[in-house]
Image: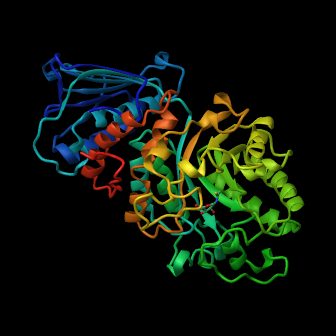
Amino acid sequence: MSLLPRPVSQTTDASAPPFRLSAHSVIRTDPSAATTARILAEALRASTGFALPVEPIGTEEVVDSVGTDITLSIDPSLSTTSGAYRLTAAASGVEIVGADADGVHHGTQTLRQLLPPDNWAPMAGAQDWIITATVVDDAPRFAYRGAMLDVARHFFTVAQVQRFIDQIAALKLNHLHLHLTDDQGWRLEIAGWPELTRIGAATAVGGGEGGSYSADDYRAIIEYATARRVTIVPEIDVPGHTNAVLAAYPELNPDGVAREPYTGTEVGFSSLDIHAESTYEFLDDVFTQLAAMTPGPYLHLGGDEALATPEADFLHFARRVSELVATTGKTAIAWHEFGASRELASGTIGQYWNYVSPEHGHADKLRSFVDQGGQVVMSPADAAYLDMQYPDIATAGLTWADGPTSVERSAVWEPTDIVEGVGEQDILGVEAPLWTETVPDVQTLEFLVFPRIASIAEIGWSERRAPDWSDFRVRLAELAQSWSAAGIAFHRSPEVSWL
Ligand code: TNX
């Protein structure tokens, strides 16, 4: 099997005896990779039916050494790049050495791509679990490789988010941005603000019942993600996209009157009251609590499409709120509109959503984050947005970002070629967002996300090269066999010769 994302190097020796996973195989692990070992063992037990005990390295007995073990270890001297690993598969066993715990985790994802795709199928039944003798040396290009899930327009349960985490982690993505609030819903319980979830969470696009995460739910998502080396990036979108808050708390409106709940799909009509001190007291409480609940380094504060906020107010707000988030000890991330302010908290990260060829003004706003000591995350809407329609079928998705997005278009863009003056060192990484105005359920989610999520994985992970669609589409077809085995309802786009 070939690999996606493409590794730094892979050598394969078809003439050497292969590795064979068996009923005698043991997973041996360095203590600091024990969680990764447990997760690997649980997955492979489910498909192969083998016992696959997890044991510490160094407890082997000579009689045990039948050459079918998988060994996970950490060696910081392997590489200074977090996430780097080396995988060696031979008749004598599989060795995965990570530069750190992330590296071991990524190595186990490579292992699963090298095994027959049925290792993703529950109870796959008897077969030859063989890997051709191979050595993979690998490391990521960008530190931030993300997907975004909008749980505000339509709500997704903890179990559904966890399934999504498994799916992105398999592609070596390591950040999940949760868009937790929007006009149509507020999805996270905040102590002392019960109406946010009592009123603000009771709606969704199209009039569905909505939903929200309790503090325990949020913790369950965080723990699940952390075990899979995925950092949760929570977003509270302000000052626009705030109708749900304004419906929940009349006192946050300039006229003191609660807004009507909203279940449509327009954007740009709501705004917090920029001049009321109560707005900042509210936000201080929300972001302080969110920081305490979130182990990752980032809090996303939105900032997009604040079309109902006068420009001077927006600049004032951007300065204050980026400062307020920085005060929590986290690094703020904002959509690139915040770059209109030249007084952001130093180090604020900008997330770019305009096109691969920037329209007027957008590039300047992104560059402003770099000028102010921050990095950027690239999510060009016409290539990276997962909620755009496919060209061949209009059942779900939007078309505003230069029409439908083909799988090829999602795969062939280069992050450093978009905004002049924003180069490799300025780019923290890439992210593919799924907005969910047209996504009411998991089936639609998987249809839009797969296969295009593989493109962001490759662009974020693999070394820069001239895009090679003909090579990518062949590896994509192989990868999709594991999606079929896992029961993922991916879109069988006519651009790819599915196997
Ligand atoms: C724009 S681009 C939005 C979202 C919508 C999305 C739909 C950006 C940061 N915001 O509010 O859901 O388009 O594609």
Question: Residue visible at 22% across and 31% down?
Answer: 26
Number of numbered callouts drawn: 0
Name the image quarter holding residue 185.
bottom right
Q: Residue 292, image x and y in percent?
A: 64, 52
Q: Residue 343, image x and y in percent?
A: 86, 45
The answer to whether residue 396 is seen in the rendering is yes
Closest to the observer: 296 or 478?
A: 478
Instruction: Determine whether, in the image, residue 473 is placed left or right of residue 420.
Output: left
Name the image quarter holding residue 390.
bottom left
Instruction: Determine whether, in the image, residue 198 is placed left or right of residue 371.
Output: left
Question: Residue visible at 73% across and 32% down?
Answer: 421
Question: Residue visible at 56% across and 69% down?
Answer: 153
Of the 4 image quadrants, the one containing the C terminus is top left
- Residue 203, placed above or below residue 312: below
Closest to the observer: 164 or 325?
A: 164
Q: Which colour scheme is used?
A: rainbow
The answer to whether residue 226 is seen in the rendering is no
Instruction: Determine whether, in the image, residue 171 is placed left or right of residue 129.
Output: right
Q: Residue 89, image x and y in percent?
A: 26, 23
Closest to the observer: 279 or 153?
A: 153
Instruction: Determine whether, in the image, residue 167 is placed left or right of residue 198.
Output: left
- Residue 120, placed above or below residue 189: above
- Residue 192, placed above or below residue 107: below
Q: Quadrant of ligand 1?
A: bottom right
Name the image quarter holding residue 169.
top left
